[in-house]
Amino acid sequence: MIRLTINNKPVELDVEPDMPLLYALRDELQLTGTKFGCGSGLCGACTVHMDGQPIRSCVMPVSAVADKAITTIEGLSENADHHIQNAWREFKVPQCGYCQNGQMMSAAALIASNNNPSDEDIDSSMQGNICRCGTYQRIRQAIKTAAKNLREEV
């Protein structure tokens, strides 16, 4: 048994220790917001948070995240009203939408650690999150707006 905390809830999984976290989330726990993209940790579609830091769940074995706090897109906000999610809707960021959950998870980690990111900070933090539709300008606008709204809340 592998013990995890997923979206603030303790979970025990009876799976092989080398099973990718992505498969445990999607197949075992039915948390399908995290997407399979490349399977190599290069595209960012599978991004989740481990203890608040973005990781690629497709290459992370569940044994490596035992006793860690994992947050998926479903756990980012109970009512889908996280600053990032609101800004994503405001700027109509998604086109096909496939990469967007991973994009939002990376962006949420960024503004949690830096609530006034520069363009360079955004580019650096979002590196490796690929959007085949090319919505990068809207992503940047959404991140800046979410960060501003977070600053104003404090």
Image: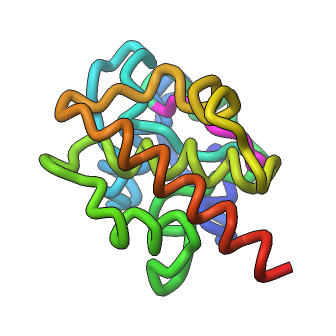
In the displayed structure image, the side of residue 61 where residue 120 appears, left or right:
right
Query: Viewer-proximal residue, 63 or 141?
Result: 141
Q: Position of residue 15 (x, y in %)?
A: 47, 39
Tell me: residue 110, above or below residue 152.
above
Tell me if residue 64 can be seen. Answer: yes
Magenta stretch encompasses residue 56: yes
Query: Viewer-proximal residue, 145 or 63?
Result: 145
Furthest-right residue in this view: 154
Tell me: residue 114, above or below residue 9.
above
| Region rendered in magenta | 51-57
Tell me: residue 19, above or below residue 135.
above
Query: Viewer-proximal residue, 144 or 127?
Result: 144
Quarter placement of the C terminus? bottom right
Residue at image position (54%, 31%) is: 126
Q: Position of residue 60 (x, y in %)?
A: 55, 25
Residue at image position (40%, 59%) is: 29
Q: Position of residue 138 (x, y in %)?
A: 36, 49
Residue at image position (61%, 66%) is: 7
Query: Viewer-proximal residue, 116 or 129?
Result: 116
Q: Position of residue 16 (x, y in %)?
A: 49, 30
Tell me if residue 55 can be seen. Answer: no
